[in-house]
Structure formats: structure tokens, C-alpha cells
Amino acid sequence: MISELQKIIKDNETIMSISNLYKSFGSNNVLTNFSLDLIKGENTIVLGKSGSGKSVLIKCIIGLLKPDSGNIEVYNKNIPDLNGAELDKIRAKVGFLFQSNALYDSMTVKENLEFPLRRHWLKVTQKEVNKMVEEALEDVGLLHTQEMMPAELSGGMRKRIALARTLILKPEIILYDEPTTGLDPITGKEIINLMNEIKIKYNTTGLIISHDMNCVRLAGDRIIILLEGKCYASGKYEELKTSENPKIKQFFN
Amino acid sequence: MAQAIIIKRFLDELGDMSRFSSRFFIEWFKPRYEIAEFFKQCYIIGYKSLPLIGLTGFIMGLVLTMQLRPSMVDYGVESQLPAIVGIAIVREIGPVITALIFAGKIGSSIGAELGSMKVTEQIDAMEVSGTNPYKYLVVSRVLATTFMLPVLAILSDGISLYGSYLGVNIKGETSSLLFWTQVTNSLEFYDVLPAFIKTYFFGFAVGMIGCYKGYNSSKGTEGVGHSANSAVVVSSVTIFILDLLAVQVTDLLGFN
């Protein structure tokens, strides 16, 4: 009984805690006192209008942007306080899937996947690298594309390869920046299924930025509504969908 | 008022560019050294530019000789044609024309490549992947342009002089031995050295400006086009400014 209780507590442990985050560009206040806890093993969706600061939030988390103030605590470290080397160690555990996929045009798929393994503190042999690349490509079902260039791939395949590159270091947290934007509904659903499979297979925690309602419905364990720079509402899809609050309703109609 | 804004924008840009360039001198000393990327860029920037640089150099030498010939004949100093052309090519025309062609080909390609990488978030992806994008992209390219342009300029000088030799022989007859003897006799060590040294500065400027424009490209395809275009324009103007400074310095040092 006690061990089960401990397991529940462990299962609900906060893996990342964002508190009182502020970020502005000139007079444009994008994030104003934004707070959010990510629960281990849960996919959290951040839903918001275009320009509401979703991408700014995710870039602050990965350290590409520095917030004006506030804390982003993960693995007992506060991201805005970290130097380059410390941030690099955190980034190995926190994967990032770019909206535009950000595959290197001049490199083959294999070279793209090998790129995150260039970290000097990662001591891996070429044999291990090959195995890791194959495993990541197998996870996304594209093992045959190793020697292809990104330009030869379809939009859905590029997204899968970008996901494989994110997965290569087996991150515990994955940040998805609008993973289904620009994809047709069928391919979009395939990517959502893949995200759910990855979550189950590797017990990853996800923070998904999206305004695609299919993605919100199918991939989100918990949904956060980002409005006016704050975490305006939080809950499960069904709870928010039935809300009478007009500001929440506008996302679901 | 509008002029004040333009001046402020220019000074802002100059300040940003200086900061961006000064980072190069800090970064290139520190490990990790991107040696493989440096050699790859040397191959792309140096070897692949050779046909274009060679062709323009050859035409330049040939045309210059043919254009100068009538005036030299009028003054009765036709026999000095190889010496005059040799000095003109080695001291000035060779390095500057090579640098301008180089700025057009390499400056624009670096500006467009880094610009599109910026717009498609590839530079951010590199940072997230644990690689310093400045070191990987900028340091390797700037070192490659700095070391490759002098080599290309020397080759271009040689090919230009060969073009000039053919130009001399179109309407006259000069043996190869006489032509090359006249060229080498007219040149001194202090003609060659400053011309050679300034190509390092030209190469650095082309690489750095191309990288700066690309790295700071604004969003969208228009931004990429603008980066490529302004990389060429600013590099070309900078080459002339550096040339002007180089001639003043060599004059002060008594090399002229």
C-alpha cells in the first residue's frame, strides 16, 4: 500500500517548474507572470493564439531566449542562470522539435542525426553512433532514408527525421513547437500517434505548443491556455471544452 | 531628421558588426576546433572558385594588354608593355579584381546560406544540439576566406600574366623568356609583399561581412535575398576602402 502510494507520488512528480516568467520585446509584454509545472510522463499542451508568446515560452525554456525575470527549474537547475556548458548538459536531456524541423540542408539524414552526438563530453564510438542512428530512425519508421538529403523527403518525413534527431539522445523531456503545423490532417495524425508512442515507449514528458485542435485533443493529457501572457486556464480537454468562459470557449468553437 | 536616423542606423550597424567581428578573435583560439569544417569550406571557397577566378584573371590580363598597346606604341615604349602590365596586375588589379569577383561569388553565397539557415531555425538547432554555431559556421568560413583569397590572388596574377603574354603576341612577337624576364625585372619584393598582405584583409572582410549579414538575416525569404545582396555590396565597398588604407600605409612605410 505504502509502495503504491510512493509510486503515485513519484508518478506525479514535477519534472520542470516555471514560475513568474516575464519576457518583453520593447513595449510588447509577451509573457507576464507565467507559471507552469510539468508533471513527469505527461504531455502538456500550451494552447494560444498566434503571437500570444507560445514560441517565446518554449525558447526561454531551452535557453535560446533569456527571460527578463522568473525561474525555469529543471533537474535542480535554474535555466536562466546557467552558463553555456551547464545549459548544454540540460539540453541533452531536454529535446526540442522545431516548427520548421530545422534539418541541416547540406547534410544527409544520417549526418543530421549524428550532429547532436558531436558533444565533446559524449564519449561514443562510431559503432555506437551508427547503432543510435539506426534505433532513432527505426522509432520513426524511416530506417531506409539514412543516405538521403532532407530536400528529397516529404513534409511528414522531414518532421519524423527531426523527431528522430530529437530522440537520438533519449531525452526525458521533449518540447514540441507546433508539431503538426503545415502538415495535412492525415500526416498530422500520424505525427500525433508517433508522439504518443514515444511518450509510452520512453516515458517522456512533453510540452507541446499547438493551436491544432486535433493535436490538442489527441496528444494532450493536460491543456494550458496561454492568454495575455499568463497561464489563463488549465485542465483536461473535456473540462475546457465545456467551459462557459467565453475566452476559453473561443478556442474550442 | 531623416538624415539623423540614417546616420544612427549606420552607426548601430557598424557597432553590431564590430561586436560580431571581435567575437571571432575570442572564439577561434578556444577549443573545440572545427578543423573538418574548415577544410570543407577551404575546398568549397577556394577550389570551387578557381575556374571563375582563373577565367576572369586571364581575360583581364589579355584585355589590359590590348587596351594599353596603342598608347604604348604612340609613346614609342611598346617594349615596356610586359613591365607595365606586370606592375599593374601584381600591385593592384590582380588582388582587387580577384577580391571583387570573390566577394560576388563567395560573399553572396555565405550571406544566402547563413541567412536561410537563420530563417529556417538551423542555427538555433545547432545551438540546441550542443554545437557553438558561431564557431562552426562563422569561424570556419572566415578562416577559409582569409587563407584562400591570397592563394587565389596569386594564381589569378599568374593566369593574368599569361593572358597578357598572349595579348602581347597578338600584334607583336615577344618570346616567353623575354616577356617573363621583363615582368620579373620590373617587380620588386616591396611590390609583391604589400599586394599579397592586403589580400588577407580582403579575404577576412568578405568572409566576415557575408557571415554577419547572413547570421543577422531578418525573417523570411526577402531577408535572405537582402542578406546575400548586402553582403556583396558592403564587401565590395569595404575592399575599396581597405585598398585605399593599404596604399596609404605602404606609402607611409616607404614601400611605394
Image: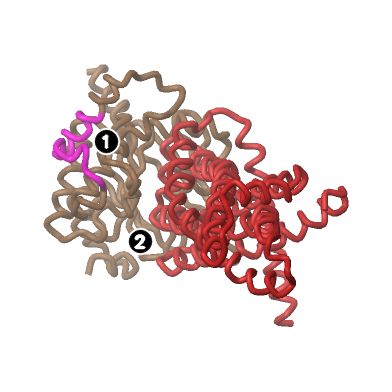
Q: Nearer the viewer, mark 1 or mark 2?
A: 1
* Residue A28 appears in the figure: no
Residue A164 is a magenta residue: no
Tell which of A24 and A127 is nearer to you. Answer: A127
Pointers 1 and 2 within a single chain: yes
B106 or A91: nearer the viewer = B106
Q: Which secondary structure, mark 1?
A: helix
Chain painted in red in the figure: B
For residue A13, side relative to residue A64 (left or right)? left
Q: Residue furthest left?
A: A186
- Left or right: residue B187 versus residue A174 is right
Identify the residue at image location x=73%, y=50%. Answer: B186
Three-letter amino acid code at the position of disc 1: Lys
Q: Please identify the quarter of the rendering in which residue A50 is found.
A: bottom left
Q: Which residues are magenta?
A: A133-149
Which of the two residues, B44 or B157, is positioned nearer the viewer here?
B157
Residue at the image position 58 percent from the left and 68 percent from the top: B66
Q: Residues within 10 Å of mark 1 (few under 14, many from 20)?
A: many
The tint chain A carries is: brown
| Residue neighbourhood size for the residue with mark 2, other residues' Cα within 10 Å, grouped as few (<14), some (14–19), many (≥20) | many
Which residue is rendered at x = 35% and y = 38% of the image? A95
The residue that disc 1 covers is A110
Exactly how many numbered labels are in the figure? 2
Name the residue carrying label 2: A48
